Image: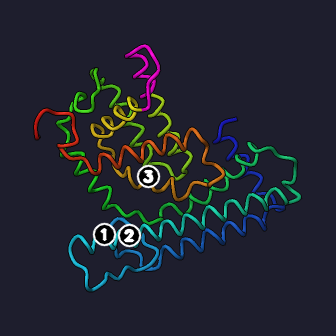
Amino acid sequence: MCMDGIMKNWLLKMDQPQCNQLMLQIQLFISSQIESSNEGQGEQSGASPAHHYQPPTDLTGPEALIEEESFYKKLQIEQGKKVREFTTAMTTQFLAHPFWQMPVNFMERALLLECIEKYILLKIKPKILIYKNSDLKLSQQLQTFQFIIPKHYDIPYNVSPNLIYECSKDFNLMNEFSSPRNKLICISNISVRLFNYIEQIQSKSATIDQFMQLLTFIILKSNPQFLISNISYIENYRSDELQLSAWGYFLANFRASIESVYHLSPKLLNTGKEI
């Protein structure tokens, strides 16, 4: 059964009177997170901060922006920790409840955890603060380096426009999801597509270096919106129990590629002269 079907079955069970107490705990937690996010809402354009930010009076210019960004990142990390801890605790309560109690393996527990995580984040995602200054800086950086061609990254073949287009669709799709799982699926789809593309070109397995070169080039050419926010969202809100090795590996590669682009300068490109 697909995840959507599993989620539907879970919601049907949650409508049963025996689950009223479990649902009440979830609803109370959701309300507490929304209430927290509503405190001071509106002082930052495009975000729903959990608390009002008061900039230090002795900081101005870039230093003030760095301090503000650090403040909001800390809030998201703290909220993410609360969500992860609550979803794990609720999963344990579900499995101990008479209506749910049954012998379960790791996969069955993981699917239950997925449902609880997805339900909670679907409700609170609109209120989760998204500090977009880093996304804006990355987008400006990507625009600056749109002239880049494959040889700048030691890519010895032409990159198909269709590959860039297909990856761009997955980048954009990430913005539509509340579930970290669905965002990770987009990342996995892009990664598998790039590995397959390299292998088709050279008729042998791709190395991690070859993959990272192509991934960075694709990010540059796609210029995806809110990529840093999406990665941070996954890192902060994805349950520790659900950090599967393959997805975690792809996520780490994306974070490393973003960091390299974020700090990219002409000197770091494979060119014979300054650009």
Instruction: Check disc 1 and report the residue beneath it.
Output: 66
Q: Is residue 214 left or right of residue 196?
A: left
Tell me which amino acid carries mark 2: Ser
Q: Quadrant of residue 88?
A: bottom right
Which secondary structure is most common in the magenta stretch? helix
Q: Is residue 102 left or right of residue 223?
A: right
Contact between marks 1 and 2 (CB within 8 A): the answer is: yes
Q: Secondary structure at mark 2?
A: helix
> In the image, what residue occupies the spot 33% across and 44% down?
224
Instruction: Check disc 2 and report the residue beneath it.
Output: 70
> In the image, what residue occupies the spot 49% across and 49% down?
177
| Residue furthest top in the image | 203
Q: Residues within 10 Å of mark 1 (few under 14, many from 20)?
A: some
Tell me which amino acid carries mark 3: Asn
Q: Is residue 47 left or right of residue 112?
A: left
Query: How much space separates mark 2 and mark 3, taking CA atoms?
Result: 17 Å
Q: Secondary structure at mark 1?
A: helix
Q: Nearer the viewer, residue 177 or 87?
A: 87
Q: Position of residue 157 (x, y in %)?
A: 28, 20
Q: Which mark is residue 49?
A: none
Q: Please give the range of residues in magenta.
A: 194-208
Instruction: Check disc 3 and report the residue beneath it.
Output: 230
